[in-house]
């Protein structure tokens, strides 16, 4: 099993960052994501927004594995998230549905106000646990290292994409402001 974790400070207010989370795709830095479909969304009695989404994306799968398992390069992921406007915390858990019998990727993402500058800065906390399973357990080290490398690259591009969407939101907000 390999574990990946990063804490990144985003120099934008939590409200903009969480809005960008919902509008993140499409963006130029995450072209591998093909679609995002909302399966369920509701607000509970405590005012917490619960969302469930299905994401699909093109994945870099070693050619040999594509041939062995007669698989496509499109993979599916299930995301369950909560957004608590009282505590200003968005938390999402994502797991791969495709190839999960071979490799399990469990990702956690938390967006919360940075205590050092809560009005203008958001903490982006991302972790992933990657475990080779089944027939791949024999080559677990290679499989997990390859997957971590791909995950890290996608995570870095995902943060760039989030910044791009934040810029798009800020421009939209500026256009909507009345001229005095």
Image (spheres, rainbow, N blue to C red):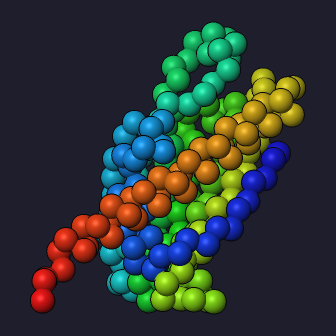
Q: Where, by quadrant of the figure, is residue 172 drawn?
A: bottom left
Can I make out residue 137 in this image?
Answer: no
On screen, residue 48 above or below 69: below
On screen, residue 10 above or below 94: below
Please tell me which residue is depicted at 66% across the width and 32% down the height of the picture: 101
Q: Can you give x and y, in whole percent of width and height, for residue 136 in the image?
A: 78, 26
Quadrant where the N terminus sits is top right
Please tell me which residue is depicted at 13% across the width and 83% down the height of the picture: 179
Answer left or right for 158 relative to 45. right
Residue sitting at the far top: 67
On screen, residue 120 above or below 8: below
Along the line of sight, which residue is nearer the eye, 117 or 141?
117
Along the line of sight, which residue is nearer the eye, 47 or 123?
123
Can I make out residue 72 in this image?
Answer: yes
Q: Can you give x and y, in whole percent of width and height, for residue 150 in the image?
A: 67, 38
Answer left or right for 134 relative to 26. right
Residue sitting at the far front: 180
Q: Where, by quadrant of the figure, is residue 112 drawn?
A: bottom right
Q: Can you give x and y, in whole percent of width and height, for residue 149 in the image?
A: 73, 39
Answer left or right for 95 relative to 18. right
Q: Can you give x and y, in whole percent of width and height, for residue 157 in the image?
A: 56, 48
Answer left or right for 45 relative to 59. left
């Amino acid at each position: 099993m390999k574990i990946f974790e990063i804490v990144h400070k985003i120099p934008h207010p939590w409200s903009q960052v969480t809005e960008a989370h919902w509008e993140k795709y499409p963006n130029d830095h995450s072209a591998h994501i093909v679609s995002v479909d909302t399966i369920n969304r509701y607000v509970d009695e405590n005012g917490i927004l619960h969302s469930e989404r299905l994401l699909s994306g093109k994945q870099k799968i070693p050619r040999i594995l594509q041939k062995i398992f007669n698989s496509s390069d499109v993979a599916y992921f299930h995301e369950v998230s909560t957004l608590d406007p009282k505590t200003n915390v968005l938390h999402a858990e994502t797991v791969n549905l495709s190839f999960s019998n071979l490799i399990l990727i469990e990702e956690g993402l938390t967006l919360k106000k940075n205590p050092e500058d809560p009005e203008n800065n958001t903490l982006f906390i991302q972790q992933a646990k990657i475990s080779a399973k089944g027939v791949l357990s024999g080559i677990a080290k290679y499989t997990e290292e390859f997957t971590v490398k791909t995950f890290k690259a996608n995570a870095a591009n995902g943060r760039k994409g989030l910044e791009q969407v934040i810029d798009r939101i800020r421009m939209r907000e500026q256009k909507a402001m009345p001229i005095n």
